[in-house]
Image: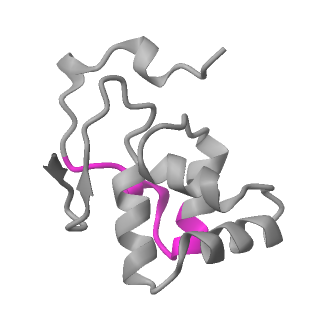
Amino acid sequence: MQVWKSGLMASPLKHPRNVVGPAVARLRIKGALSQAELAGRCQRSGWDVSRSVIASIEGRARWVGDFEVVILAKLLGVAPADLLPDKVAWDELKLRDFSPRR
């Protein structure tokens, strides 16, 4: 188990699909929002997602598009860059890790 900055426990994925999930979770919790509440805000902004999609993003199991990063940042009250981690082990990442599933 790995502890993210948010204090949440997460099992590291063999092939994570995004780098923004931990920050989304941390900021959502800091803003006292449930996953369902964040999904509702996303829906009202025009992005049709469910609570389970938010959970998949936070768990790094779902690929996240650039427009989705922008929407999440806006709804969480931060700049898109604030969703990116301070450090990424780029040499450990593989392109397939972030490719949309087929």
Q: Is residue 94 above or below residue 31?
A: above
The residue under the point 53% across, 63% down is 73
The residue under the point 31% across, 32% down is 13
In the image, 46: left or right of 4?
Answer: right
In the image, 4: left or right of 97?
Answer: left
Number of dots carrying numbers? 0
Q: Is residue 33 above or below residue 99?
A: below
Q: Tell me where residue 34 appears, x and y as whole percent.
A: 53, 77
The residue under the point 42% across, 41% down is 60
Q: Is residue 85 magenta?
A: yes
Q: Is residue 51 magenta?
A: no
Q: Name, please, the residue furthest toward the bottom.
A: 32
In the image, 64: left or right of 88?
Answer: right
User: Which stretch did the figure color magenta?
Assistant: 73-86
The residue under the point 25% across, 43% down is 11
In the image, 42: left or right of 62?
Answer: right
Q: Is residue 67 above or below residue 100?
A: below
Color theme of the render: one colour
Q: Tell me where residue 91 appears, x and y as whole percent.
A: 19, 17
> Which quadrant is home to the C terminus?
top right
Question: Which of 64/37 is in front?
Answer: 37
Question: Which of 84/19 is in front?
Answer: 19
Q: Tell me where residue 71 appears, x and y as whole percent.
A: 64, 59
Q: Tell me where residue 89 appears, x and y as whole percent.
A: 18, 29
